[in-house]
Image: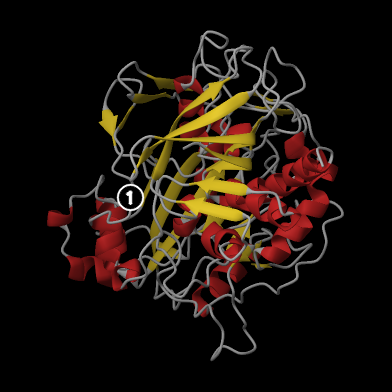
Amino acid sequence: MTQHYDLIVIGSGAGGATLAQRLAPSGKSILILERGEHLPREAENWDAKAVFIDHRYRAPDTWYDRHNKPFHPNTHYWVGGNTIFYGAALLRLRDRDFEEVAHKGGISPAWPIGPGDLRSYYDEAETLWKVHGTRGSDPTDPVGAAPYAHPAIPHDPGVERLRDHLADQGWSPFPLPLGVDRDEEHPVTSPCIKCKTCGGYPCLVKAKSDARVRAVEPLLDHPNVTLLTGRKAVRLETDASGRTVKSVITEGVAGEERFTGDIVVLAAGAVNTAVLLLASANSAHPEGLANGSDQVGRNYMFHTLTATVSLALKGMESSFPKTMAVNDFYWSDPRGGFDWPMGHIQLLEYMSGRTLEGQIETYLPPALAPTFLFNAVAERLLSFLVISEDLPDPQNRVRLGRDGRISLDYTHNNLEGHERLVHTLGAALDGFVSHSHPISQHRLEFSSLLPLYGTAHMAGTARMGADPRSSVLDPWCKAHELDNLYVVDTSAFVTSAAVNPTLTVVANAMRVGDHLLERLAGRG
């Protein structure tokens, strides 16, 4: 028997869960379909070997790159989506990120919405997701942003020394905005204990602000909200005209099932949302649902990322190092000589020996570096993530084969500013890190573009825009070609900017949610 709902949301990550949360008080019947299950709370949540070496929680998917080489994407299918494993860095896009910006490698196009459209939602999202920060300390902070409701997480001693080292060179390091439930004034009763198992791990005490904790679990007692796990959406069916989605077909624990809804919202992630649209081709949409523009799956972005790992001259004295960031080079090199955007720098999480072993296994086989050696290195480890904007390119795309094979055709672009920033960071660390330690010469100090399986920041595959000829969605994230289909994950992003995307996903889902509340209210 087909079950009907006012609203069907596909995916329970930051976008889908936030949208459902926004609409739940309306009393409308809401169905959330999640292909994964509830993540078990178990000791392995905080076990580096289980998480980083055994990949206990990673999706078993195999995707293919542009050379037809298989790889396992760094993605996770659980209630709450990838946010369960993210590093909790929650930054707003800069105001200029919404505008057309010239980069050395090309043009970053303008969004159809501006910073004013999201400002109040950013404020609300930062409060709901318990973001800790210091407004105004970031030289690129958006104009008119409200003060953070929660103070910045204090730096550990080693990070404080690093901050002073960079400040002495004229840099403006600032507290990295983090979504954690930390009460610094009452550490004994604080849910967040500033552990060594935050980014990359599930939070066993649920103190990290992920979609599971901040959006899904508060919904479970709502009588009008239904969460069905173990259901993978495989196809959307439309009416004969192709203007309305009539059914969502799922496969999973109960076999094939069919659900109908007045409004259908996709939030399955930039790859899987595009795949679902392509898999839903029919006579009215022969190239894929909502794909009259031929833009579904195209413009795939996932940031240009370099992990820079060095050995400090002395112990870092930090169990929670991910508290500092730098945006001095976001728009250009303030020293002159490069007038294009370069990107963003942030500290990475604490890496234990096992974490380090799992993270760099591509570069150094674990058999060649025993755990005790990794553990010794970890005490002096200084890890940064350098993020630069990769530009939307229609040739960078998600493809779906007839056999269901998912392929990513991706070629890196806009690299000059990124490489300059990586070099600038390396030079700035002189005097703070050891460049002569023999271990560091064997790739325990390395800078390299993260391989394709580092797909955490993917975006752009169903982008919004005012022109149906060059975009998939309108500015309200409704498909141009359908009356009741919306998308609220990073697929809708026009550009990747150079900061972590999650806060923008949440704010935009709130915005679209308010739009849908008005639409549903009009139906009575």
Outermost residue toward the left in this view: 367
Task: Left or right? Give the position of 135 relative to 86.
Answer: right
Quadrant of residue 146 within the rendered picture: bottom right
24 relative position to 115: left or right? left
Residue 489, position in %: x, y? 59, 40
Q: State the residue position of label 1.
A: 58
In the visual, does 364 lie left or right of 265?
A: left
Whether residue 508 is situated above or below residue 239 in the rendered picture:
below
Where is residue 400? Give x, y as percent: 40, 21
Residue at image location 60% in from the left, 55% down from the top? 225
Name the spot of residue 79 as percent of width and height, x first. Answer: 46, 55
Q: Residue furthest front?
A: 1
295 w.r.t. 452: above or below: above
Q: Kindly state the secondary structure of the residue where label 1 is placed.
A: loop
Q: Nearer the viewer, residue 205 or 439?
A: 205
Q: Is residue 507 visible?
A: yes
Residue 490 position in % (x across, y down)? 59, 38
Q: Residue at x 33, y 50 (%)?
A: 58
Query: Dividing the image into 4 quarters, which one contains the C terminus?
Result: top right
Asked whether 336 or 162 is in front, the reply is 162
Residue 336 sits in which quadrant?
top right
Residue 189 picture quarter: bottom right
Q: How is the image coloured?
A: secondary structure
Residue 139 position (above or below residue 117) = below
Q: Is residue 139 visible?
A: no
Task: Residue at 46% x, 37% y: name it.
Answer: 1
| Mark 1 crowd level (few <14, some 14–19, many ≥20, 10 Å Cα) | some
Q: Residue at x 82, y 53 (%)?
A: 120
Q: In the rendered structure, which amino acid carries the disc numbered 1? A: Arg
Q: How many marks?
A: 1
For the residue pair 142 and 468, the one nearer the viewer reads as 468
